[in-house]
Image (cartoon, rainbow, N blue to C red):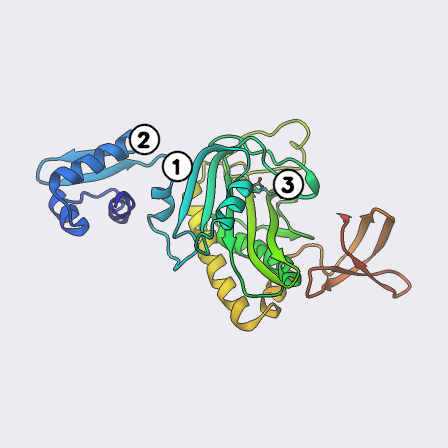
Amino acid sequence: MRSELLQMLLDHQGNFVSGEAISQHLGCSRTAVWKHIEELRKAGYKLEAAPRKGYRIIHQPNLLTENEIKAGLKTNYIGKHVVYEKSVSSTQEIAHRLAREKVAEGTIVVADEQVGGKGRLGRAWFSPIGTGIWMSMILKPKIPPQRAPQLTLLAAVAVIRGIHAATGLHCDIKWPNDILLKGKKLVGILTEMQADPDQIHSVIIGIGINVNQKNFPDEIKEIATSLSLEKGEDVNRALVMQSIMAEFEQLYELFLKDGFLPIKQMWEAHATTIGRRITARTVSGAIEGFAKGITEDGVLLLEDDFGTIHKIYSADIDF
Ligand code: BTN
């Protein structure tokens, strides 16, 4: 009910909405409306109340709780069930537990802070409080487990499109699934799965987005950036998240209906790695060549100067 009230106030963009209209819309008493308004105030909203005019929003705090995420969300199932926590070890861990408890497809776990944020290849993911979007999405696609990596590529395209729709910023993908803004890392994606050899139970897509950080620890300050550093102002995290979820749902529907090919094409169009000369530093040495594209499994195809095509499964890429 509170997210509906919030939605109504936000839809009026700072104009007054009468208490009568709110109570009719929500189907509750004027006293109940007043109580919800007080709850919003406690959460950090500045709301003006004027006799005979009603209520209006003056200031919206940059929160990521269930109310903010649901107010204005334009999806059918992604993000319809939100689990918000202030501080967690990792949203991936909570999502794994919920997935085992058989929550609905599209359930999102989001936290204001992660103290044990997980990156790829066993690395840590810096997730300070109140600044970023640290979220995990639970999916239950009826596809063979070998196709699960395709969902990481789909998520990368959804994130790029969602960020563009919400902020106007253009990002690129660096293979395998880093999202860069002006050459610096903005977003990391970590896909994990609960599956039998021939059947997926759930896929958990963890997405970490640097939104309002103004600085980073020394180890990553040269290579990381945030949306606000590029925009020069704070960015509303809930809007970015809603936009990404809407893009994700559209692409996911397309993927389930038409397969991976359209997603692969979109991914390649956003990937800076593809169509240029690169060096892939693998565990068994460096290979230089021309990045031709990716396979159906997201494996990078690299043509060396002798015309041999190498399949790159894991590497750091230099341009
Ligand atoms: C990478 O190494 O690039 C992937 C980083 C993924 C980070 C996100 S933040 C939300 C989710 N929870 C985690 O612990 N990790 C992922």
User: Whole-percent x and y of residue 19?
Assistant: 13, 42
Q: What is the three-letter code of the residue carrying label 1?
A: Leu
Residue 234 in view here = yes
The residue to which callout 3 is attached is 119
The residue to which callout 1 is attached is 63
| Mark positioned earlier in the residue sequence (3 or 1) | 1
- Residue positioned 63% across, 37% down in the render: 224
Can you name the residue that lies furthest to the right here?
306
Q: Looking at this view, is 182 or 92 the one in front?
A: 92
Q: Tell me: is circle 3 under 8 Å from ligand 1.
A: yes
Looking at the image, is mark 3 or mark 1 nearer the viewer? 3
User: Whole-percent x and y of residue 168?
Assistant: 48, 50
Q: Is residue 256 above or below residue 245?
A: below
Q: Are marks 3 and 1 in contact (CB under 8 Å)?
A: no
Q: Are marks 1 and 2 in contact (CB under 8 Å)?
A: yes
**Residue 119 as seen in the image, left or right of residue 33:** right
SS class, disc 2: loop
SS class, disc 3: loop
Disc on res. 139: none
| Mark positioned earlier in the residue sequence (3 or 2) | 2
Q: Looking at this view, is 48 or 197 the one in front?
A: 197
Q: Are marks 3 and 2 in contact (CB under 8 Å)?
A: no
- Residue positioned 61% across, 50% down in the render: 192
Circle 3 Cα neighbour tier, 10 Å, few/some/many (<14 / 14–19 / ≥20): some
Instruction: State the CA–CA distance, disc 3 to disc 2.
Output: 32 Å
Residue 46 in view here = no
Circle 2 Cα neighbour tier, 10 Å, few/some/many (<14 / 14–19 / ≥20): some
Q: Is residue 24 above or below residue 147?
A: above
Q: What is the three-letter code of the residue carrying label 2?
A: Gly
The residue to which callout 2 is attached is 44
